[in-house]
Image: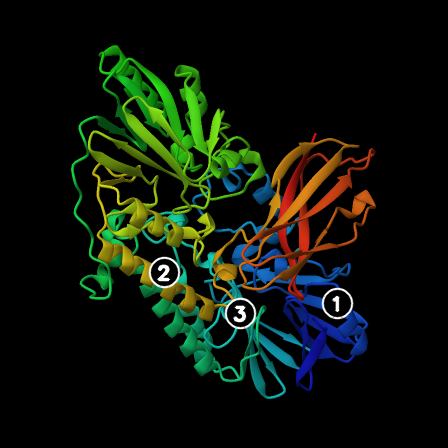
Amino acid sequence: METTYSQLSQNLYIHHGHVNTGIIRDGNRAMLIDPSGATLQTTLDELGITKVEQILFTHHHRDSTSGFPIPENIRIGVPETEVQWFAKVETFWNAPKFRWHLYNYHPHNLMLSSSISVTDKYAEGDELTWGSSDISVLETPGHTDGSVTYLVDADGQRFAFTGDLIYDEGKIWELYSLQKGQQTTDYHGFLGARDELKESLEKVRKSLPTALIPTHGIIMNNPDDAIDKLLDQLDYCYNKYVSISALRHYFPKLFTDFEGRADHMPIRKGKTPPDFLRHYGTTWLIISENREAFVMDCGSPNVIKQIQQLIDEGEISEVTQFWVTHYHDDHVNAIPEFQQAFPCETITDAIVAKVITNPMAFRLPCISPAVARVDRTTCDGDSWQWNEFKMTAYHFPGQTYYHGGLLVEGHGVRMFFSGDSFTMAGIDDYCSGNRNLLGKDVGYEKCLRLIQELKPTHIFNCHVDQAFDFTDKEINFMLDTLAEREKCYTDLFPWDHANYGMDDQWVRCFPYQQGVKAGDNVTLNVEITNHSDEPRTAIAKPILPSSWGIEIEPKGTTILPKTDGQIQFSITIPSDCNDSGRVIIPFEITYHNRPLGQFRETILVIK
């Protein structure tokens, strides 16, 4: 992408790099709004600006706050409620609650890799003057909890620097920052920050700006039309989510405004499970005719006590096989203790196994640090006999991509254990971090096609006591809704496919975290999912600590459509490295000629 700038008024310029940076000019001096990226300096040189005296940031995300070398002795102003994420960001990186058991998305991990000094903090109604321009502050949460908008009155016009509230008419940059709980944790809050976003956009609208300048996006010279189109698109997209949401079963009060909608799938009634099943917490247990037990998931020590009680009472003789549906902590926390108590064979899907045997290598919602032993991994269609039951395993990317499904046939029934992927109300895709991909042969489309093919008599959710099933009409309704979602969410983002805006992990580092020591040679991989229908090029560059005195050249790769690509780096940590604890290594990413800034990160824990 060619670096350019535009002039909005006599004293206001916009640098168009991987983000839009506001340049308020006063002779050879300047104030910058959201400076990020090394190419900004080229624009400053062209404009004859020799001194940057003040910087304002709209929000704390690293992709819009990093990469521009900040001069010494400069005033830096940030939103009042986000000061910690600028000046004390190590409190985020060093806190276990922001690494494990992740049920909250706020703050998001798109954090600065190290702290910067803050001199000024701004809240609603604050005002300042720079050169001939007057600047006032609006608190506009949505994209982040503490986001602000800077209204710049320059040369008889008003320009609203809105951060990432809006990208363009009817579009936002990405969706996962809007994951926010309302009656629950953020984990259940798909598009939960949309009301805050709407209120913030209305507040900006009432300020009567001449134009909207987003951090990511296109300058909008008709703010009313841009905001109206976005609000309409968000409402339409959210309705298409609610219409088949499993969350209606768990939290019906969240959706009272949608009750009785003819375009929503009715909620199914449950059915009684067969009498050879037991359910404890998130665990289903099958008892065979010879009293052996097949156990699925173990998230709590209480499950181990319940199983031991069954043994003590003679209802079961022993546990002989153990299946893990997916990696979420409420399904795996107690696996090490379970495996010690019941040393049976542990089986899981090959993709699930990667996470539960090495959780340190991943950063995902609800992830547990518990490390499980896996004795056998399965792929689609692998079958085996367990006593009188035939077991068939599948990769089942429903509630999360890292998920398996198990068909159990016996006693005249076909039971499908879907983990947490369905309830009687529909599909469990309420957390964007779970990688609920849209499209053919991925995500819930793949899962529903499998259910349609297998025709189970009973479907089981790990959190629900009753079984249920779906009719062909209901499955087709869910498939049609997913196809419409793929279209309407693609329209919501500035990408050629919805998954770029919805999949928080389409670019990821592997391993996410690893322990190292000075002098070690470390392998780091950047993995990229190409969600497009055509090949895409990707370039990555690690940003190492300046004290290491090492700079690594960027590397690139071409990724085929609908596949994963990988860029590998080998880094030798200096033998005289004095760092200890966590060192955050951001990666600058360029995808299909679009620079994304410091888009993802890996963590080295130096001993």
User: Mark 2, residues whose alpha carbon is within 10 Å: few (<14), some, or many (≥20)?
Assistant: many
The residue tagged 3 is: 494
Question: Could you tell me how many numbered marks the image carries?
Answer: 3
Tell me which amino acid carries mark 3: Pro
**Secondary element at image label 1:** loop
Quarter of the view holding residue 161: bottom right
Tell me which amino acid carries mark 2: Leu
**Residue sitting at x 73%, y 31%:** 517
Number of the front mark, 3 or 2: 2
Closer to the chain start, of discs 2 and 1, is 1
Q: In the picture shown, does residue 287 fall above or below 89?
A: above
The residue tagged 1 is: 39
Asked whether disc 2 touches disc 1, contact meaning CB atoms under 8 Å apart, the reply is: no
The residue tagged 2 is: 482
Number of the front mark, 3 or 1: 3
Tell me which amino acid carries mark 1: Thr
Q: Is residue 195 at least partly visible in the picture?
A: no
